[in-house]
Amino acid sequence: MSRDVVWLFGRGLMDAPKVDTFAIRRFLDYLGREVGAGCRYLLLTTNWDFLLQREIDVAFSAPWPKIKGVFHLNGTVEDRLYANRSRSLPRPTPLLLEDDPAERRVQTIEGNWAFNLMIWEKVFVVVGMSFECQTDKFLLHHLSEVQDDLPIGESLWVIVNPDRASLDAVSSRILKVLPRAKVNLVCSTFSRWQDEGFPGLEG
């Protein structure tokens, strides 16, 4: 692939006994080895955990140039001193719950930074996000306000979810706010998608 890719990860529990970060490590390895040298990645998550940037810091002894940043759209339980190398923001984004009203998503440095990077991207991968809650719909709404003038308006969205009904719902929500976008649906778990060589990202 010759274009930048944005990866969005759904909610998870960081310290549960059965948490296995192998899929994250394998995903980072794939980005490092298999994808074009010119690609850089913007990583967005609604997770409160910081497994993703922790695995980045474990895997790479220096800041990884392929990553533009790891942004927590709904806040994080991370020690907000930002000691890890994949984040360098001066203050936290407030924690948001799935049942919070849309007005709880207030402007923050982190959110504005992530949004301003998103609107210039053309390839998005959505893993485990439904855009069903009001705070996430708020994000899509604001993307729609700029889509006529910026690359996101004609973007490609690869949606990965093992539930077909959820895939169709996410596709509908995205196309409603970005009608010129294209959507590739992948009915699969994230791990199986990796096993199969990331279908939907061809070309």
Image (spheres, helix red, strand yellow):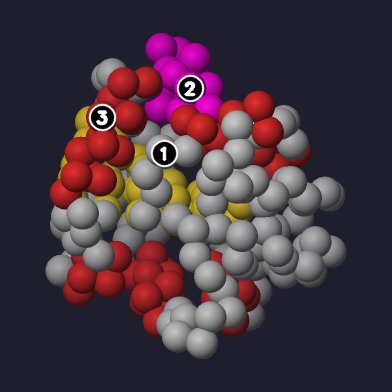
Identify which residue, 78 or 84, lies in the foreground.
78
Q: Amino acid at mark 2?
A: His
**Residue at the spot 30% in from the left edge and 38% down from the top edge:** 170
The stretch of residues the image draws in magenta is 138-153
Q: Is residue 97 above or below residue 14?
A: above
Q: Is residue 185 above or below residue 119?
A: below
Q: Secondary structure at mark 2?
A: helix
User: Nearer the N terminus, badge 1 or badge 2?
Assistant: 1
Q: Is residue 9 visible?
A: yes
Residue 182 lies in the magenta-colored region: no
Q: Is residue 166 above or below residue 70?
A: above
Numbered label tally: 3
In the drawing, what numbered circle is on residue 67?
Answer: none
CB within 8 Å, label 2 to label 3: no
Q: Give x and y (percent) for residue 91.
A: 82, 49
Q: CA distance from mark 1 to mark 3?
A: 10 Å
Task: Give the crowd class for mark 3: few <14, some 14-19, many >=20 residues within 10 Å.
Answer: some
Task: Give the crowd class for mark 2: few <14, some 14-19, many >=20 residues within 10 Å.
Answer: some
Q: CA distance from mark 2 to mark 3?
A: 13 Å
**Residue at the spot 32% in from the left edge and 29% down from the top edge:** 173
Q: Secondary structure at mark 3?
A: helix
In the drawing, what numbered circle is on residue 131?
Answer: 1
Quickly name the residue at label 2.
141
Q: CA distance from mark 1 to mark 2?
A: 11 Å
| Prevailing SS of the magenta stretch | helix
Q: Give x and y (percent) for residue 15.
A: 58, 79
Q: Give x and y (percent) for residue 158.
A: 27, 45
Quickly name the residue at label 3.
172
Q: Amino acid at mark 3?
A: Ser
